[in-house]
Amino acid sequence: MRLRSFLASALLVLAGCSDDPPDPFIEEDAGGPPIWEITSEAGEVEGWLFGTVHALPAGTAWRSAKLEETLQNAELLVVEVASLEDQAELSRIFTRLALDEGGSSPLAARIDPALRVMYREVLIKSGTSADQLDPLETWAAALTLAQLAQTAETEAGVDKALLRQFGAQDVTELEGARAQLSIFDGLPESEQRDLLNAVLRDANNPDDTLKELVAAWQAGDLDLLSDLATAGLLEDPELYEALLAKRNRDWAARIEPLLARQDQPFIAVGAAHMLGDDGLPTLLRERGFTISRIQ
């Protein structure tokens, strides 16, 4: 029961919870997070793409006049996971997948020896014991450590704010919590350990990394955002394919019929999914849509 309570608490951080005041607007001359307009071969507006940051420091400005205008025109919100407010369900899914029912070796034994000192430091700073993490599958321990390494000032990000703005009947999801976590759960153990080690390598300065990424996102600097978003764990080719490229291909296949409907969808997923040759703008262009950046 103590372990399950710990996992439920970890999921509250993973999904994010915030009672902050409304998100402040970004300065007009500051660029703004990139928005792409999707038009058909006939030139009709079919929808929009928007790259999000899942967790932001409280008070981060990201809304703009262009974004609000676009949201007013959108009739459907499309996100990765629609149930971010359902903490109980998220906790049940995570706990069911995260626990290694067959038994596992101590997590420290699954970590690169050079990173074990960092692992101990994260445990000490977060007030977490190794006994709480040892029963977890490696991927689940990695995600939990990533959250434990962050400071408490990082709150829920753009996805939850947008979900609150749309009614439940006007939201659809590309993946869902179970399918998303199952991607991690399905990784080979070797790749799960690569994920774990990458998380620990980034644990030295998670907030500095987040601030740099958020600044590039706010400014709409796609080149810098691409460099930052695809560093760390996404430098591993197998993790890049499983966690980003393959998911983008699957999403593009799901998005195409959504664009054929009368509803104009506002598609908001993690900013890394919008970048480069494997990004959604490129994949939708390949499917015959015109993708134009409007912010």
Image (spheres, grey):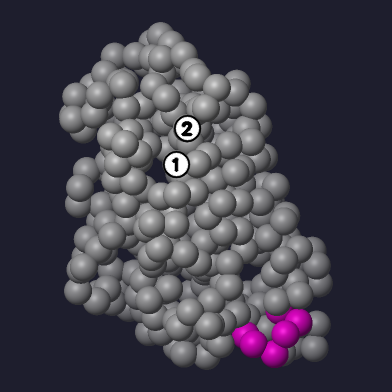
- Residue 84, x across and y down, in percent: 42, 62
> Residue at label 2?
99
Residue at 68%, 60% in the rendered image: 251
Q: Is residue 70 magenta?
A: no
Front residue of 156/105: it is: 105
Residue 95 image label: 1
Q: Which residues are magenta?
A: 259-264
Residue at 19%, 24% in the rendered image: 124
Where 52 falls versus 179 (above or below)?
below
Secondary element type, mark 2:
loop
**Quarter of the image where one finds residue 240:** top right
Could you classify mark 1 by the number of other residues whose Cα lies within 10 Å: few (under 14), some (14-19), or many (20 or more)? many
- Residue 87, x across and y down, in percent: 37, 58
Quadrant location, the N terminus: top left
> Most prominent secondary structure in the magenta stretch?
loop
Let me know if residue 137 appears in the view: yes
